[in-house]
Image: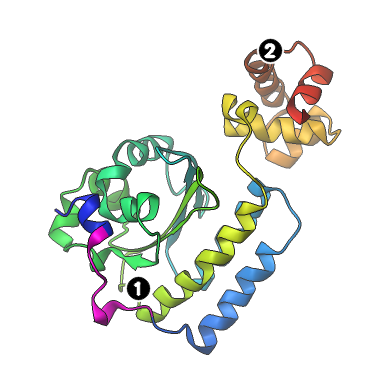
Amino acid sequence: MPSPADVKSRPRPASARIPTPGEVGLRRILAVADVLLGGMEEDELVEHLLPVLRRAVPADSVLWLAGDRQHPKVWHAEPAGAVTAEQAAALDAHHATDPLLAHAWTGSGAAVRRSDLHTDPEFRRLPTYDTVFAPLKARRQLVVGVHPDEQRRVAVVFNRTAPDFAHHDVAVAEALRPRIGRALARFGSPSPRREKVSPREADVLDLLCRGLTDRQIATRLGISPRTVDKHLEHAYVKLGVRCRVQAATRWQS
């Protein structure tokens, strides 16, 4: 199996050079660009973006891995629930030894298919295959890596059972890569306070700062008001505050 260093240094074969997207591909790129230009928060952007990405590069599922230079921390999937918490933990633990994920995380991030990096038998020997990709029936994959700034990393993984991704799919994904990077750059790096809380607690605090009640937050996030209250209780401890007003002030400072 090639090491991540081998993957980064290996030249792309001439047959695998990224072609032009073509007319259909350009229409798909423009559809994604419309979402990227929308005025919304980062989590909301990702929520709207993944279904459009899945249509732009036709796939059975799409995974969104986001974090710092060492580890993925935030996971999204389209369709929702495609990856369990246990599978997300396995991806975090083994991403550095998976050539496809290492290429996106620490390499150039250029659009590449798994079949461009290693063979099917090599793929099946990876820890990520049995724990994550076999249950997803992800036999064919395409990835792009986005580096919005020096610290942040995003990997977008497109999965199919079959057939393999075509050259025009690679072209569309590569054309989308800088556009996604520019859209994410406007959000800046996460604050130290945001890194103290869980992604769901951050969602609750964001909505709290907009003046929403527990019931309104619950409706927006699809959870119960009691669950909202529990998230706030945990967030208060992590932020070192005692009430909603203090939490909102600390979260916005």
Q: Position of residue 141 (x, y in %)?
A: 33, 63
Q: Residue at x 81, y 24 (%)?
A: 249
The answer to whether 247 is drawn above or below residue 84 in the figure is: above
Which one is closest to the eye, mark 2 or mark 1? Answer: 2
Q: Could you tell me which quadrant the C terminus lies in?
A: top right
In the rendered structure, the answer to whether residue 106 lies left or right of residue 152 reads: left
* Between discs 2 and 1, the one toward the N terminus: 1
Give SS at disc 2: loop
The three-letter code of the residue at mark 1 reads Phe
Which of the 4 image quadrants contains residue 95? Answer: top left
Q: Where is residue 150 in the image (x, y as percent from the top left)?
A: 50, 46
The residue where tag 2 is placed is: 240
Q: Give the range drawn in magenta.
A: 9-18
In the rendered structure, the answer to whether residue 156 lies left or right of residue 113 reads: right
Q: Where is residue 6 in the image (x, y as percent from the top left)?
A: 20, 56
Mark number for residue 165?
A: 1
Prevalent SS, magenta region: loop
Asked whether residue 14 is drawn in magenta, I would say yes
Q: Residue at x 20, y 48 (%)?
A: 126
